[in-house]
Image (tube, rainbow, N blue to C red):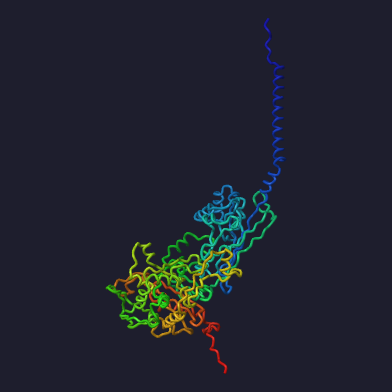
């Protein structure tokens, strides 16, 4: 009889279940032990480490940018200040999908695609980790309200209050004081990341750039407690920043406005210097521009309009404009000739209206084609006689001419704190050989003697050379700064806060009376009826020493006469004039250049007169008491 088939083996199933329970229990115990061990490792062994990480997530160190120093003119009129403004910032590490955040911002604030592109450009610029990036400045109340309502859609976005640079006088000091702008990637690589933490602007041009170290100040810090969204709950510790030093400049607002008014909308440059101190009293380059456009970022349209303007408003003509000085250089050439002994005050030549080198047919024309007859030094300066100075330049020779004029500031940087100043050019045979691989010709020496040819000078260099004559050879470098919290430029140089600049040696002539001879000739220009600028000088209430000049823009062929009707306006000669006054006690030296003005005496000299009147005369039109010559002493018997 067959064995019955068992449908289920209960004993085997029980053994299987017991084995599974044991294995499961072992696994549960092992996993529990792993979890306990991991918890012990994290909470006991690495307790200090994770406590620090947790605190760092809750406590942050935030930089406090210093307040930038203010800038004043010599009378305390504020030129550059700081005004409060609300800005929109984004912290990339907290924003998540920052592209989407930017899209939301554009939608919320109803901005354009051009604004979106600007935001992205600013966001991609170099920055430090967890540093908020400003993308929009000077928010309106409506914009602030819209951002507040949509804050839940804008992670990492904050509205912050900060001080923004402002130039209340607009165009008046754009070329001298300059402006600040956003720090770019190249600048960020050069700057101290600690010193500029939280700072988004830096000086770009002018005094703002040169005195950046003085104006910037020192950054402060604060430890703050934040919530999970990065919002500040409380301040735990604060180290106050140190504000930058205020600057007081030598510039005078009233004189600056007078200089700009005297140019009357013409393209040109005016620079006025106080001879005794080198202080720059006025520095006008026209046309100018509004520096406020650059502070928070200029639009493409506005920048293109400035950049592409035929009048070049961004071009600083006082510092960067290189022009042949023309006849304004003749007083300095005369001083060189006297000191070198090649002429005396009574040396005369005959002027038939031209000058010829021996054995050469070419005629170097005097501006007066009819000639002046016998000409001595005083008459040569007074009448701006080219023939006399052709002969003098040849007697001096190019090397002595170069050395004397270079020593007086032509072809070299002359200022202490005008960083954008161009060198100009005082040519020499060595320079020409290196530049053109050609020899120097005698005819080039002749035209150098009347300020033409290769020679190029800035209006600032001409003003400095004029002040040098007024100071009788004493060198004082021009400077914008009067004081920085009581410190002079020399003290700032000693402290290493601005670059060291050595003052050139004084121009010491063999006889001091040579300076008086040159000054007398310059006085005749304005106060002798035959002087080229007598019409201007005859109206002055004080004695002026000056010299006119005309700089050619395009060459005129041999034998041809200058005909303005055949020349385009922008190809006409530049008009120049230099002067200092009062002669007895020089208080101001001025250099003026009017582009395409044609006549130094007719166009530039009246500008000089207006600037000097604004400085030397009081409100009643009389010479200020402090500038009047002292009355002669009365002898007692």
Question: 262 or 612: nearer the eye?
Answer: 612
Q: Is residue 352 left or right of residue 402?
A: left
Quadrant location of residue 164? bottom right
Identify the residue at horizontal 61%, vertical 69% (top origin). 485
The extreme top residue here reads 1
Residue 6 falls left or right of residue 268: right
Q: What is the total number of numbered labels drawn onto the structure image?
A: 0
**Toward the viewer: 403 or 494?**
403
Vertical relation: 346 (above or below) 303: below
Q: Quadrant of residue 267?
A: bottom left
The image position of residue 378, as x and y in percent, is: 40, 82
Q: Position of residue 580 (x, y in %)?
A: 47, 78
In this view, 383 is above or below 400: below
Asked whether residue 393 is in view, the answer is yes
* Front-most of residues 104 and 383: 383
- Please state if 192 lies on the left or on the right of 456 as rendered: right
Q: In the picture, which quadrant includes the N terminus?
A: top right
Q: Quadrant of the C terminus?
A: bottom right
**How far from the left and from the top, in percent, is residue 278?**
52, 73
Q: Is residue 548 visible?
A: no
Please say if 366 is above or below 80: below
The picture places residue 333, in percent across and down from the top left corner, at 41, 75
């Amino acid at each position: 009889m067959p064995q019955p088939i068992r449908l289920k083996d209960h004993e085997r199933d029980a053994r299987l279940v017991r084995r599974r329970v044991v294995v499961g229990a072992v696994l549960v115990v092992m996993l529990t032990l792993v979890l306990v061990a991991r918890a012990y490792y994290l909470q006991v062994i690495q307790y200090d480490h994770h406590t620090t990480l947790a605190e760092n997530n809750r406590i942050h160190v935030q930089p406090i940018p210093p307040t930038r120093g203010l800038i004043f003119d010599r009378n305390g009129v504020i030129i550059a200040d700081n005004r409060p403004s609300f800005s929109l910032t984004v912290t990339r590490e907290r924003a998540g999908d920052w592209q989407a955040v930017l899209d939301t911002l554009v939608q919320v604030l109803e901005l354009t695609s051009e604004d979106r592109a600007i935001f992205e450009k600013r966001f991609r610029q170099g920055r430090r980790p967890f540093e908020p990036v400003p993308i929009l400045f000077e928010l309106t109340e409506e914009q602030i309200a819209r951002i507040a309502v949509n804050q839940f859609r804008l992670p990492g976005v904050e509205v912050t209050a900060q001080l923004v640079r402002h130039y209340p006088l607009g165009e008046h000091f754009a070329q001298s004081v300059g402006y600040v702008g956003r720090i770019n990637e190249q600048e960020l690589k050069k700057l101290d990341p600690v010193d500029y933490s939280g700072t988004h602007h830096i000086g770009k041009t002018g005094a703002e750039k040169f005195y950046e170290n003085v104006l910037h100040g020192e950054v402060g810090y604060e430890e703050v407690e934040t919530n999970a969204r990065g919002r500040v709950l409380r301040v735990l510790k604060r180290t106050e920043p140190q504000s930058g030093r205020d600057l007081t400049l030598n510039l005078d607002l009233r004189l600056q406005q007078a200089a700009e008014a005297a140019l009357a909308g013409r393209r040109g440059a005016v620079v006025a210097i106080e001879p005794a101190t080198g202080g720059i009293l006025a520095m006008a380059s026209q046309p100018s521009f509004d520096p406020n456009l650059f502070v928070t970022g200029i639009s493409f349209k506005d920048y293109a309009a400035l950049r592409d303007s035929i009048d070049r408003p961004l071009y600083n003509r006082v510092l960067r404009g290189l022009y042949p000085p023309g006849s304004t250089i003749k007083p300095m050439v005369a001083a060189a000739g006297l000191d070198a002994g090649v002429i005396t005050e009574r040396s005369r030549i005959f002027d038939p209206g031209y000058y010829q080198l021996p054995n050469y047919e070419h005629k170097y024309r005097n501006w007066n084609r009819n000639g002046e007859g016998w000409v001595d030094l005083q008459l040569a300066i007074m009448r701006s006689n080219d023939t006399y100075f052709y002969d003098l330049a040849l007697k001096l020779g190019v090397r002595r001419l170069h050395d004397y004029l270079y020593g007086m500031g032509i072809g070299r940087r002359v200022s202490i704190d005008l960083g954008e100043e161009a060198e100009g050019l005082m040519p020499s045979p060595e320079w020409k050989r290196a530049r053109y691989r050609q020899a120097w010709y005698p005819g080039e020496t002749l035209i150098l003697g009347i300020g033409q040819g290769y020679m190029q000078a800035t209006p600032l260099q001409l003003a400095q050379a004029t002040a040098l004559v007024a100071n009788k050879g004493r060198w004082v470098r021009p400077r914008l700064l009067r004081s920085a919290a009581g410190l002079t430029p020399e003290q700032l140089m000693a402290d290493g806060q601005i670059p060291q600049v050595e003052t050139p040696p004084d121009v010491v002539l063999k006889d001091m009376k040579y300076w008086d001879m040159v000054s007398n000739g310059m006085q005749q220009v304005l106060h002798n009826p035959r002087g080229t600028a007598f019409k201007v000088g005859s109206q002055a209430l004080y004695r002026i020493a000056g010299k006119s000049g005309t700089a050619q823009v395009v060459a005129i062929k041999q034998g041809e006469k200058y005909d303005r009707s055949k020349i385009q306006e922008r190809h006409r000669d530049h008009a120049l004039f230099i002067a200092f006054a009062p002669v007895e006690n020089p208080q101001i030296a001025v250099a003026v250049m009017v582009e395409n003005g044609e006549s130094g005496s007719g166009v530039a000299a009246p500008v000089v007169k207006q600037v000097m009147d604004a400085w030397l005369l009081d409100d009643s039109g009389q010479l200020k008491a402090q500038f009047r010559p002292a009355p002669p002493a009365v002898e007692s018997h």
